[in-house]
Image (cartoon, rainbow, N blue to C red):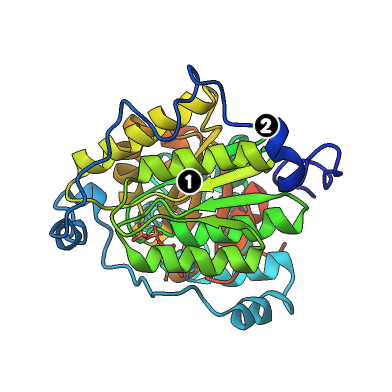
Amino acid sequence: MNWFGFGRKKSKSEAPAPEEAAPEQPAAPAEEAPAPAPVEDTPEPVAGPVQGDALTPVPDPAMAPPAPEVPATPAPVQQASASAKPEGFFKRLASGLSKSSAQLSGVFTRRKLDSEALDELEELLIAADLGAATAAKVIDRLAKDRFDKDVTDTEIRQALADVITETLEPFQAPLDISGPAPQVLLFVGVNGSGKTTTLGKLAVKMTREGASVITAAGDTFRAAAVEQLEVWSKRAGAQFLSRPHGADAAGLAYDAVQEGRRTGADAVLIDTAGRLQNKAELMEELRKILRVIAKIDEAAPHHVVLVLDGTVGSNAISQAEAFMEAAKVTGIVMTKLDGTAKGGALVQVAEKFGLPIHFIGVGEGEDDLQPFIARDFARALAGLDA
Ligand SMILES: Nc1nc2c(ncn2[C@@H]2O[C@H](COP(=O)(O)OP(=O)(O)OP(=O)(O)O)[C@@H](O)[C@H]2O)c(=O)[nH]1
C-alpha cells in the first residue's frame, strides 16, 4: 500500500537527477520568485538575546504542552529497527494504544446494562477523552440493542469500536503527494509535539518508496531540532538544508523550495519552530513562510501538516485551533499515542475539525509512524483484536 500517493518510484526521465535538472530548470521567473531571497519579507532580527527568549515557555496554555521531553538527537537507528520488526502492524498499534485501551477497561465490569451501568460507562468514555458526542453515540447504541440485558465485555468493546470506526472513517486519508513536483509540505505544531520526529519518519518512508526528498530545518532557533533533523535526513538519504542559528526561517523555506525545483525533487519537507517569544510571533512567522513559498509556487505549500501531541488529550483541540487560523492546515498527524491514556482525543479532534488524519505516532522509531486506519485504531483503542 502506498500511503503517499506518489506512486511507483520515478524513472530518471520523470524525475531528473540534480545534475541533469539544474541547467534546464533555473529558478522561477523573476516576477514569480524574486531572487536571491524573499524581498518583501525582510529577515527578522535574530540578535543574540532572542535565543533565551525563544526558549521561554509560551504563556498561552493552548500553545504550551506539558513539559515534553526533547532530546538532542532522535532515537538510535538500531532501537527503531529492532522495535519495528518482530510485531505485526496491528500488534504494534495495539501495544502503542495499550494505555488508552487500559483506561477504557475500567468500563467493562458490570454485567447487566441498566441505567446506572450506562451512566457509568458514559462517564468513563468521557474521562478517556473520547468526547461527549462519541460517548453518547456508544451509549445510545448499547441502550437500543441491549438495555437491561446481560452484556459481555466484548459486546461493549465491539459497540465502542464500531462507533469510533464510523466516526473516524471519513477522515482516514493517505498523504497524497502525487501532484506536481516538488510537493511542498510544511509541518506545524507546538514545540515538543513531535514535528521534527514526524518529518524525519516521513522522510524515511518517502525515500523508501522511491521519492527524492529535501528536508529543511526551519526551527532555526532550537539547535537540537536542527541536529535532530540532520540525523533523520541522513537516515532517510534526503538532502538536508539548514541555516545558522536564529536565521530567518522563511528564507530557508524559500531556498528549500527553489532547491526542490532545481533538483527535480519529489517532496520538500519544511520543519517549523513550535515556540518563539510568543504566540503572535510564531503565527506571524508561519504566515511569512507561507507568503514566501507562494512566491515560487502559488499552490505551495501543498500540505500543511499539523502535528498534535496525543498526550495532551482534549487540549489538542485548543492547540489545533491556534494553527488552523494562521496556517490553513490540510491534515493531521497525532503523535505519542503510545505514551498516553488519552488516545481517544483523536476522535474529538477529528469531529471538531473534520480534517484528514494521515498518520499516528506510536513510538519514537522510524516505523512507529503508522498510516491512520480508522478501523484498526478503533479496535486497538477498544482493546479488541484485529
Ligand atoms: N513515545 C513517542 N515519542 C514521540 C513520538 N513522536 C515524537 N516523539 C518524541 O517527542 C519528543 C519531541 O519530538 P520533536 O520531534 O523534537 O518535537 P518538535 O515538535 O519538533 O519540537 P520543537 O522542535 O521544540 O518544536 C522527542 O523526544 C520525540 O522522540 C511518538 O509517536 N511516540
- Label 1 CB sits under 8 Å from any ligand 1 atom: no
Can residue 110 be seen?
no
Q: Horizontally, is 58 left or right of 386 in the view?
A: left
Coordinates of residue 260 in the picture (x, y in percent) = 61, 41
Q: Residue at x 65, y 70 (%)?
A: 92
| Structural crowding at the residue carrying mark 2, measured as other residues with C-alpha within 10 Å and reported as few (<14), some (14–19) or many (≥20) | few
Coordinates of residue 128 in the picture (x, y in percent) = 40, 58
Q: Horizontally, is 140 left or right of 289 in the view?
A: right
| Structural crowding at the residue carrying mark 1, measured as other residues with C-alpha within 10 Å and reported as few (<14), some (14–19) or many (≥20) | many
Where does ligand 1 appear, by image quarter?
bottom left
* On screen, residue 127 above or below 45: below
Residue 25, disc: 2
Q: Toward the viewer: 188 or 315?
A: 188
* On screen, residue 284 above or below 40: below
Q: Secondary structure at mark 2?
A: loop
Return the residue at label 1. Answer: 347
Amino acid type of the residue that numbered disc 1 sits on in the rendered structure: Val
Comes first in the chain, label 1 or label 2: 2
Quarter holding residue 26:
top right
